[in-house]
Each structure stands twice: as structure tokens, then as C-alpha cells.
Amino acid sequence: MAKSLLFVANMPKTELITIGKIVAPHGVRGDVRIVPLTDFPDRFYDLTKVLVDDVGELALESARQHKKFILLKFAKLDSINDIEHLRGKLIKIRREDAVKLPEGRYYIFDIIGLNVFTEEGLLLGTITDVLQPGSNDVYVVKQQDKSELLIPAIKEVVKKIDILGKQMIVKLQEEMD
């Protein structure tokens, strides 16, 4: 376990994805109550190990739904005393363990940090947040003068997203016919 702790400690934060938070022990046999922080809470049922903040990699023995929570049982942690120190810790997975999204769909954490350019190549700024007000997402772009530009995440505006190239090409609404 020490080897994987070292590996995790040296892993860039962007390579880890938060999927839940341990809120409390559940019962006396070592189960913990998790608030899922993911659009895919069923993922917990297929995991064999997770990364826990300040603890490292822990093997999972079982996962089950309980009301709005997920109950996890970690291997070799069999009492309330074994898991009490986990309260409040975040549960993460490696990027390669993330649910694969369909073509043209992206995780918010992949969108944040992209440089946004017009179709003419003018740099507008960098995406700092993604708002989800309803019918479509809205990208918050911090411009060079520190002001914010809101860009609707619709195909008429967003022309290209290049995650590897860390850029997005847009057609601003004023430019649209």
C-alpha cells in the first residue's frame, strides 16, 4: 500500500476525479455513508478500489444504496473505530477509471481551463466555470481585462472543442446571421 500512496501523492490533481464524500460511519461494522458527487452513482458498484484524501488507495468490499447515500465497506476496516478518521474525506478515482462519455460530450473539469478563440483566431479568454441554469450550459470566460463573458453551450455558438489542444472555437452571437 505504501507504494500506491507514493504514486498517488505524486499524481497531478487533474488526474484524479472526485466522485463522493464520506459523511459519517454507518453502523458498527465499518460501513461509511457516502454523498455521491457524480452524475453516475452506479459507478460505486463496479469499483474495486478508490483513493481517499490523506489516506491513499483503499480496496472496496461492497457498495449499496441507502436512501440518498451510498454505503461503502472498505476491505480490512471492520469497525467504527477503523473508519471514524475517514469522516469528511473525499473519494476519488483515476481519470482512466472515469465513465466514458459519448462523442461530443465532455466533463466539466475538462472544459474548465480551455482557451476560447473566435473563428478568426482572436483569444477571448479562459473558461473558469460552467453554469448549469437549465436548458443548456453556459461557459464563463475570464477575459484578459478580467471581465467575464458568458457563452451559451449550444452548437450554433460552440464550433469546436479540442480537449487535448486545450481550446474552444466559438462564433459569438453578434457575429451570427
Image (cartoon, helix red, strand yellow):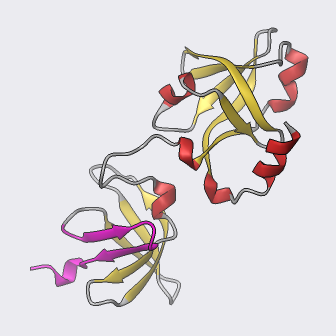
Q: Nearer the viewer, residue 27 or 51?
A: 51
Residue drawn at (34%, 52%) of the image: 105
**Name of the residue lying farthest toward the front:** 3
Question: Is 102 on the left-hand or right-hand side of 111?
Answer: left
> In this view, which residue lies farthest toward the top?
28
Q: Is residue 161 magenta?
A: yes
Callout count: 0
Q: Residue at x 51, y 57 (%)?
A: 109
Residue 15: quarter of image: bottom right
- Give the side of residue 131 with respect to residue 58, left or right: left
> Which quadrant does the C terminus fall into?
bottom left
Using the image, determine if residue 116 lies above or below residue 152: below
Specify whether 149 is left or right of 31.
Answer: left
In the picture as drawn, the residue positioned furthest to the left comes out as: 177
Name the one closer to the observer, 18 or 15. Answer: 15
- The quadrant in which residue 93 appears is top right
- Which of the 4 quarters of the picture holds residue 49? top right
Q: Is residue 85 above or below residue 7?
A: above
Q: Position of residue 67 (x, y in %)?
A: 54, 15
Say which of 58 and 37 sits in front: 58
- Residue 113: x %, y % from top left: 52, 70
* Residue occupying image coordinates x 32% and y 46%: 102
Residue 104: image location, x then y, percent? 30, 55
Instruction: Name the quadrant of the N terminus.
Output: top right
Q: Start and end of the magenta stretch?
A: 156-177
* Front residue of this view, candidates 85 and 73: 73
Q: Position of residue 162 (x, y in %)?
A: 38, 69
